[in-house]
Amino acid sequence: MTKTMQAVVLSRFGGPDAFEFREAPVPELSPRQVRVRVHATAVNPLDYQIRRGDYADYVPLPAIIGHDISGVVEEVGSGVDEFSLGDEVYYTPKIFGGAGSYAEQHVADVEIVGRKPRNLSHLEAASLTLVGGTVWEALVERARLSVGETILIHGGAGGVGTIAIQVAKAIGARVITTARASNHDFVRSLGADDAIDYTAEDYVREISRLTEGLGVNVVLDTVGGDTLTRSPSMLAPFGRVVSIVDIAQPQNLLEAWGKNAAYHFVFTRQNRGKLDALTALVERGLVKPVIGATFPLAQMSEAHALSENGAARGLRGKVAIDVAGAAQALQAVQPAA
């Protein structure tokens, strides 16, 4: 095995041009770890927030970042009997806990690694790990969404939203989502029952109309700011709000208190159990990742630029990265309305 690998290294905090494509040392393998040949990764909002310096205190530079991996096991450490050489796996590397996924090889604790769904390509699987784990924790473990309930999912055409719609429908919920009018047919094709054009309509008023004044049982906030502030106005009694974004401004929760509402803030944790649950849904055909664009590893700067401004450019789903090098840069992005 070679001692170096190709990697995308964050050398400074800043814009998409802050990355360098260069050789880096292959990480050492410890007991209860596996070494994975990375075939694909993807770009998440967390990635470009780290790149900008939002979490500078947690990421010493230079750093290899990235939070999605799909690949093949090349080496197992002592004490590992869950996987063998050649197994196809997928997982989210530890957040703020070591090297990330923007490289040809990665070493991970075996407890966070899951078997890749058999019916997904590596690109599809890599686009699912962080968003899928986040959605599972938000809807199943925290909100405890159940059959017959109604959920509002903000940003239904985005990376998290596309998976959240499908998981919510698999649970048996009624799904209302916000999306640009040009994406309404798309989010309905994923299972959304109703779509609200947040650029042209007051979504609080529309929720009242669609629920006949009853409100929704769960709000999944993927946007923050105004959507979090206005969430209590759309809740049914004993409703739940789950937010996956930072609290950007103080919140007045008096209205939420009056509805006996519960609030959950999710910074997702990595474990195999969530991945196995997602795999079961994927292999039953109930969840399918959505890839809006694909780039090779060497074009990470372009991938970040697109992902960071994806909504304005009509991006649907995730930006995937072909680490194995088989794909040329492909921007299969729907035109913005």
Image (cartoon, helix red, strand yellow):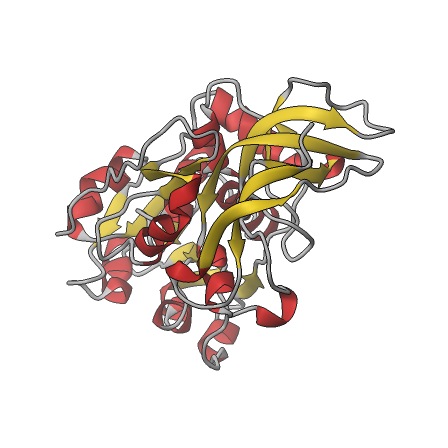
Q: Is residue 208 left or right of residue 16?
A: left
**Residue found at the very far left of the displayed protein:** 337
Number of residue marks: 0
- In the rendered structure, the answer to whether residue 133 lies left or right of residue 163 reads right
- Front position in the image: 87 or 196: 87
Task: Name the residue nearer the viewer: 92 or 213.
Answer: 92
Q: Height in image: 132 above or below 243?
A: above
Q: Quadrant of residue 28?
A: top right
Q: Is residue 213 above or below residue 83?
A: below
Q: Would residue 136 be visible to someone looking at this image?
A: no
The residue drawn where x is 36% and y is 59% is 215
- Give the quarter of the figure containing the N terminus: top right
Residue at 20%, 56% in the rendered image: 197
**In x, y percent, where is residue 61?**
61, 64
Work out whether residue 26 or residue 225 is closer to the camera in this orientation and state it. 26
Query: Is residue 21 found left or right of 88 in the rendered image?
Result: left
At 69% from the left and 36% from the top, the residue drawn is: 3
User: Where is residue 49 shown, x and y percent of the image?
Assistant: 47, 63
Report x, y in % for residue 34. Answer: 73, 32
Q: Is residue 273 above or below residue 19?
A: above
Q: Position of residue 221 (x, y in %)?
A: 42, 60
Q: Is residue 188 visible?
A: yes
